[in-house]
Amino acid sequence: MWKWLLALAVIGLVVCAGALGAGGYVFMGYQANVEAQRELELAARASAEAAAAEMSRVDATRVDRLPEARAAYLAGDHTLAVEAFSAVLEADPDSREARLGRGRSYARLERLDLAEQDLRSSTRDDPTQREGWESLAWVLTQSGRDAEAVDALDRLVALDERDPKPLRDRANARYRTGDIPGAREDARRACTLGLTEGCTLEEKIVAATRR
């Protein structure tokens, strides 16, 4: 009888040992999965950080192209200026200088629709920007939209009533719209402020309307 009891005890020990061994394997497998998941998360985080750093570097490079864009505009290379100003705007869509610069560059390239878009945005964001109104008036004049050009020149004149050139330009635009009295008055004011072209223009208007 005792032999049977001893045999049963041995079998029980073997079964318990097997169960413990299996449990150990399960625990080790779980731990390995946790470590693998942690490594994947760390790798993903490192990749995201590297991508963000690269994007920041690229954006910084684009913003750094502002001096290049300015130089290209002044040198008369307006194709390069458009490309450089566009790169700046991709990195910083709120850059007023880049928006105005690209609009003026488009105007020089006679890409009037694109120039108007940028210049209207520029004058809306900064209504005190004289260069924006001046360029917009030129673009509208070139497009044969003299009444709208007069509106832009109204804003330009209001910024500095002592500047005779916008008065001369508004006189021409008003004349083309049929506003003869307004055109003559602007030409006279430009002449009074010392612009010889204003005096000449006033004489031409007077001569043309006497016929």
Image (tube, rainbow, N blue to C red):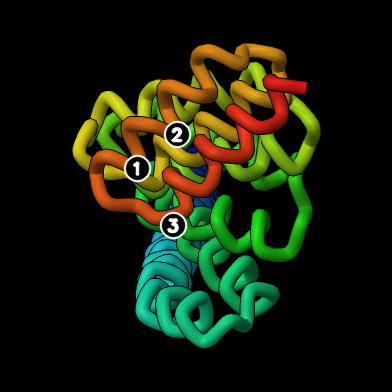
Q: Residues within 10 Å of mark 3 (few under 14, many from 20)?
A: many
> Is 20 drawn above or below residue 80 in the view shown?
above
**Dividing the picture into quarters, in which one does residue 17 lie?**
bottom left
In front of the other: 7 or 127: 127
Q: Please state which of residues 151 and 40 is positioned toward the viewer in this rendering.
A: 151
The residue sitting at 44% across, 44% down in the picture is 198
Q: Is mark 1 on a helix, strand or loop?
A: helix
Q: Is mark 3 on a helix, strand or loop?
A: helix
Q: What residue type is labelled 1?
A: Cys
Tell me if residue 211 comes above or below residue 21 in the rendering. Answer: above
Front in this rendered view, residue 179 or 188: 188
Q: Which dot marks residue 98?
A: 3
- Residue 9's disc is none
Q: Where is residue 164 in the image (x, y as percent from the top left)?
A: 33, 43
User: Disc 2 on helix, strand or loop?
Assistant: helix
Q: Do the residues labelled 1 and 2 touch (CB within 8 Å)?
A: yes
The image quadrant of residue 106 is: bottom right
Residue 82 in the figure: left or right of residue 197? right
Which residue shows up at 73% across the image and 64% down it? 109
Identified by mark 3, the residue type is Ala
First in sequence: mark 2 vs mark 3: 3
| Amino acid type shown at disc 2 | Ala
- Residue wearing tag 1: 191
Residue at 58% in and 81% down: 76
